[in-house]
Amino acid sequence: MFDKLYALSDGRCIYDGSTKDLVPHLSSLGLTCPPYHNPADFLMEVAIGEYGTDMNVLAEAAKVKQFDTLGESTKEKESMSCKLFEEKETEEKAAYEKSPLPAAVVMQFLLLYKRNLLTTKRGYLYFINRLLAHVAIGLIFGYLYKDVGFGANTILANYVYLYGSLLLIVYTGKMSVTISFPLEMKILTREHFNRWYKLTPYLLSVILIEIPFQVICTWTYIAISYWLTAQPVDFRLYLFILFCTLSTLCAQSWGYFIGATTPIKVAVFLGPVIACLFSVFGFCIRFFDTPIFFRWLFHISYYRAGFQGIVYSIYGLNRQNLYCPEDALYCHYSDPTNFLKEMDITDVDLVSNISVIVVIWCIMHAATYLTLWIKLNKR
């Protein structure tokens, strides 16, 4: 029942070892246990001195046995340790020889994209709320500016609708990632430090998982508000969709950059401020009314490029005269060219405006990548 026995007499150890070695050990000291006697009882009798044994002899013998046992145990442990070390070394060598090469960038991207899809699926309420917000604003704008798209007397109201539409999709495209992206920085820092993946596939997977959702939300808003406001349903519709989509994606790239460079408290404030700043140029003030030292902002404002592209797509490109109601005394904007001249949106090069938006989109994503690379590699 016992693996090891430890016996004391007068405060000194007289035996320390296994139970099977008890009888041979006592016999070696001249204390033979009778065959009919219980070894445990015999040891108790020896310990209390019934056989007149010198306890000093038993104590010294116990010390010798302890040293012998310790030596044997140490040798066994050393032998076992060597054996385990050799086995572990063999296993590690075999594992190293069989270990695959690091995953390719494409494989890393696919795995991260799949993970992001799964995360989005689990947090589907976030996407539904974004979509419902665009539906609600589309209905509100549609009924506020109902049927303003074809009349000459409602051209200013339609101008405000076009501005509000672009402002909406710019804000939603930017702020949706400005707020969420900083929350992933801790996860990115830990996983990139552990060399789970590289930065390039991670950033691509994040961007490409977000683009379809923002495009769907933008197109949903356009489908509702564009129809309710009675805008022209011809090639102008496709240009309107194109400029709205490019503008919201460019705003999204700004959101990634702001989220990557600033804390979330600063990003929430800085994102709307920058959007408001760029929205001034092209709508609130004309180019020739702008002070000279601010005119350079016209050339780098993606909002200006998008807004002028939208307005020119709706009222430019040789559009026919607008409808003038019979009860109206005079419709100055029956010819939409008059309105474009007053707004200083004549002779707009749509290709150049598209190029400006695309170039800014690429620059901001490159700046986001560079910012993240610096943050992840600084020591």
Image: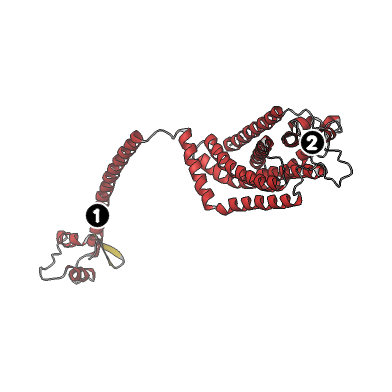
Closest to the observer, 334 or 277: 334
Q: Is residue 301 left or right of residue 80?
A: right
Residue that appears at 58% across and 42% down: 212
Residue 31, horizontal then vertical, whole percent? 15, 64
Residue to which mark 2 is pinned: 321
Q: Is residue 326 left or right of residue 35?
A: right
Q: Residue at x 49, y 45 (%)?
A: 115
Judge depth for marks 1 and 2 and give the one in front: 2
The answer to whether any part of residue 117 appears in the image is yes
Quarter of the figure that contains the C terminus: top right
Query: Mark on residue 83?
Result: none
Which of the marked residues, 1 or 2, is nearer the chain's N terminus?
A: 1
Q: Tell me the SS state at disc 1.
A: helix
Q: Write the residue at 81% across / 30% down.
A: 295
Residue at mark 1 = 64
Name the residue type under label 2: Asn
Give x and y (percent) for residue 333: 84, 38
**In terms of depth relative to the viewer, which is nearer, 315 or 96?**
315
Of all residues, the one furthest to the right in this rendering is: 329
Q: How is the image coloured?
A: secondary structure
